[in-house]
Image (cartoon, rainbow, N blue to C red):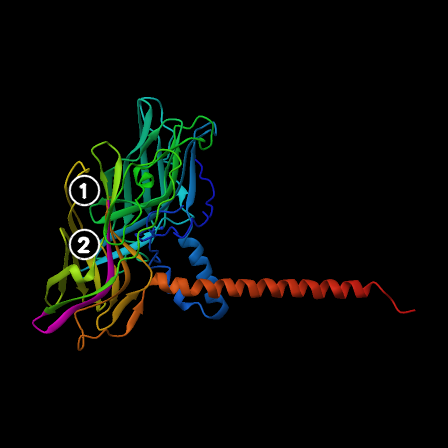
Amino acid sequence: MTGRGCRQSPQRGATPSPPPPPPAATVPPSSPRSRRCRLAPSLAPAMARAPGARGLLAAAALLGFLQASSSFEVKDSSGKVCIIADLTVAFSVEYKSNGQKEFAHFFLPQNATVEQESSCGNGNTSQPVLVLGFGAGHSLSLNFSENADKYQVEEIVFHYNLSDATLFHNSTAGGTKKVSHKTTIQAHLGTKYRCITSKQVNMKNANVTFSNVTLEAYLTNGTFSLNKTECAEDMVSTTAVVPTTPKQTTGQVPTTNPAPTASPPNPAVGKYNVTGSNGTCVLAYMGLQLNITYLKKDGKMGLDLLNFIPHNTTSSGTCDNTSAALNLTFDKTRVIFRFALNASTEKFFLQGVSVSTTLPSEATVAKFEASNNSMSELRATVGNSYKCSAEENLQVTDKALVNVFNVQIQVFKIDGDKFGAVEECQLDENNMLIPIIVGAALAGLVLIVLIAYLIGRKRSHAGYQTI
């Protein structure tokens, strides 16, 4: 089996694709929400060490990596292409290091290879499979099957090697672990599957997030079909927002050429805190928005957006020396943020989010509940505060996002109800770095043109001799 070279995907609208976003890869076409991109742990030190112009070039390369999707194909013995996949994938893996829970976040690299185990299938005896290998013994497999007039990614299998010290620093365990999960990714035969929106697959100790996906199996002409099957998340549209009504729901899901709709406004920033026996243990400024995709009674998909109104939101919580919880309740909706302390690195981080709400009457199930306890977001050193002006998306499940805006948060060591020194999020740092990179590139281009002009001028003068 052979793999095709990777290519850079263009930015889509105002929403770049990651990661981590997990990210979340990582991780965000105009997806309903943007996605935060984070550097793989093994790449961040290289960026930090590179001085001067070398550092600028390294930063530019890394930013290109974060916004790139990768394209792969599988061929049969005669060289005919049977599977093509163009996608961005972010991984988040929980592991133990010196007795502490740690998380590794990384993306499917552009130099991933199509492994020999990949196959076009053989009639009824075996089904097509795409196996992507990368790094020190890691792999991701997409196992396909067909049923009547549809094909699907029946199962995702992820192998990760805990002995890879570049990703799993000081991992207590070693060896390769295997996790798998059934999926709902499917499309009609003769069409390509397209899903811009990020979809997270939750497995034991690991999350795999797909975004900007275009794939097709059982190909007959060796390339993507012109017709496509869109995922349900991409087909959801929201109604225009009425300022006095914070909760918005969808109407009919458009089937052809939907008219543009107004984007929901950013939620107002509220101040929330939790007080323990030793004073304030959680201090948070943020705008909060809940984004839930649900199945309607007519079989179509709907989107429920809820902006928390700070003066109508009640806060409570608990805390001890190594954990804290912030509970926010607005109307019939509750969001719980659970924070933890990594004693070895002296950093706090968001470990989990739980959501419960009541969906509109058109939903098939009125009560919605979801939680994710394998997160590692909003991380900062104890005594400092984490700050991010950009919108960040905390993916609870593939149906639920908690979006935070203009967030600044500090947990555990808080002096006098005031934030400590600020640690900026990676997305804000990237936003500041992009103008520098563009400016440097333009300056370099001007310099090249100037040098070319001077060389050309010198050569033209050399053609005339004094008599």
Q: Secondary structure at mark 1?
A: loop
Q: Decide whether residue 68 is among the magenta residues.
A: no
| Depth check, front residue: 95 or 437 | 437
- The residue that label 1 is drawn on is 360
Residue 341 pos. (x, y %) = 18, 65
Counting from the top left corner in percent of width and height, residue 301 is at 26, 37
Horizontal arrangement in the rendering, residue 174 relative to residue 50 (left or right): left
**Residue 64 location, quadrant:** bottom left
Please say if 211 is above or below 58. Answer: above
Please say if 118 is above or below 421.
above
Residue under numbered circle 2:
353
Mark 1 or 2: the one toward you:
1
Find residue 137 and report its horizontal and vertical position in percent.
33, 47
Q: Earlier in the sequence, mark 1 or mark 2?
A: 2
Q: The magenta stretch spans which residues?
A: 276-292
Relative to residue 26, is residue 156 depicted above or below? above
Identified by mark 2, the residue type is Val
Looking at the image, which is closer to me, 114 or 84?
84
Residue in the image at 16% along x and 52% along y:
354
- Image point 17% across, 51% down: which residue? 355
What is the number of callouts on the image? 2
- Judged from this view, the residue extending furthest toward the right is 467
Q: Is residue 290 magenta?
A: yes
Point 45% across, 37% down: residue: 2
Q: Is residue 405 left or right of residue 10?
A: left
Look at the magenta stretch and give its main secondary structure.
Answer: strand
Please indicate, yes or no, whether residue 326 appears anywhere in the rendered image. Answer: no
Q: Amino acid at mark 1?
A: Pro
* The C terminus lies in quadrant: bottom right
What's the residue at 27%, 50% (across, down)? 242
> Mark 2, residues whose alpha carbon is within 10 Å: few (<14), some, or many (≥20)?
many
Foreground pick, 347 / 447: 447
